[in-house]
Image (cartoon, helix red, strand yellow):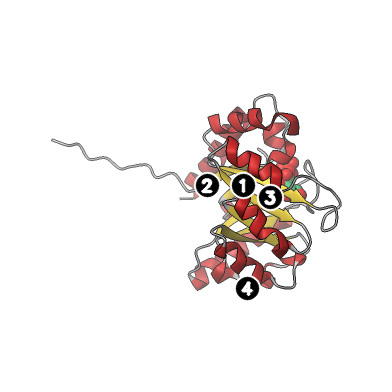
């Protein structure tokens, strides 16, 4: 006789380690560390020194990451005229590409182009940008990324107003029966993963709180557990 039992269904939530906080001379080690923690996604911050006041990495690094891992590469473009570079990042091996609402007058075109190149398309909003500016594209995005810091640098403090924006997005998704995932990026750590998870964030981008710790894999596992427990409590 087969015993029946109730399966425990863990909520769909994940930590996306941001390699911006890793040692760029040892990215392979950083990747292996978070792979061992069971993550499925790596967040890759691309900055051009114009849209944000910092320069990070570009297409060749994404191509190298693609050779080094099978993790989903989530490329966050913090660059002006993002449409010009979508093809190159897709060809380099990006799986997800996110563009800022503030970076282009043609957000719809940029999102369409991302999908045409076979990637999942995301729209990003800065702390000063209201959620409703995305209302016309929410039906055609795979994910929405809420910035909980002003983009440009790792290690900044979490801006609490992001929590309400996550809630609003969840409500808009329910109201219109959309299917995008909600992500949050900036200042995410053990002190706020439960709160953003409860608000509705499903992808928690974390840089400093993963890579600036003695054991990045343990940090990921612990934040993941906290987020899942927070959801179980409200289930
Ligand atoms: C900020 C980047 C973030 C950054 C987050 O502009 O978009 O992805 O890496 O870093 P932490 O987690 O340190 O705030
Ligand atoms: Zn980012």
Instruction: Say above or below: 72 vs 115.
Output: above
Q: Is the residue under label 2 in contact with that under label 1 (CB below 8 Å)?
A: yes
Percent position (x, y) of residue 201? 59, 53
Q: Crowdedness of circle 2 by 10 Å Cα count: few (<14), some, many (20+)?
A: some
Mark 1 or 2, nearer chain start: 2
Mark 4 or 2, nearer chain start: 2
Mark 1 or 3, nearer chain start: 3
Q: CA distance from mark 3 to mark 4?
A: 20 Å
Percent position (x, y) of residue 219? 62, 31
Under circle 4, the secondary element is loop
The residue to which callout 1 is attached is 204
The reply, left or right, for residue 26 in relation to residue 37 is right
The residue to which callout 3 is attached is 185
The residue to which callout 4 is attached is 135
Under circle 2, the secondary element is loop
| 92 or 166: nearer the viewer | 92
The residue to which callout 2 is attached is 13
The label shown at residue 7 is none
Residue positioned most to the top: 214
The reply, left or right, for residue 82 in relation to residue 36 is right
Q: Residue at x 79, y 54 (%)?
A: 150
The quarter of the picture where residue 82 lies is bottom right
């Amino acid at each position: 006789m087969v015993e029946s039992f109730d399966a425990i269904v863990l909520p769909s939530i994940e930590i996306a380690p941001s390699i911006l906080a890793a040692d760029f001379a040892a990215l392979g080690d950083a990747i292996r560390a978070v792979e061992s923690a069971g993550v499925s996604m790596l967040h890759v911050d691309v900055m051009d020194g114009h849209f944000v006041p910092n320069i990070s990495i570009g297409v060749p690094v994404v191509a190298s990451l693609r050779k080094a891992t099978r993790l989903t590469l989530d490329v966050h473009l913090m660059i002006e005229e993002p449409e010009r570079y979508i093809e190159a990042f897709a060809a380099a091996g990006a799986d997800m590409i996110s563009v800022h609402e503030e970076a282009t007058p043609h957000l719809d075109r940029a999102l369409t182009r991302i999908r045409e190149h076979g990637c999942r398309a995301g729209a990003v909003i800065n702390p000063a940008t209201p959620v409703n500016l995305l209302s016309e594209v929410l039906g055609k995005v795979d994910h929405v990324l809420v910035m909980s810091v002003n983009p440009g640098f790792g290690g900044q403090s979490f801006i609490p107003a992001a929590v309400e924006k996550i809630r609003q997005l969840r409500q808009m998704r329910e109201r219109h029966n959309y299917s995008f995932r909600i992500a949050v990026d900036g200042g995410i750590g053990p002190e706020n993963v439960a709160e953003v998870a409860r608000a509705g964030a499903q992808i928690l981008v974390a840089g400093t709180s993963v890579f600036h710790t003695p054991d990045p894999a343990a940090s990921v596992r612990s934040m993941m557990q906290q987020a899942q427990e927070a959801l179980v409590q409200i289930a």
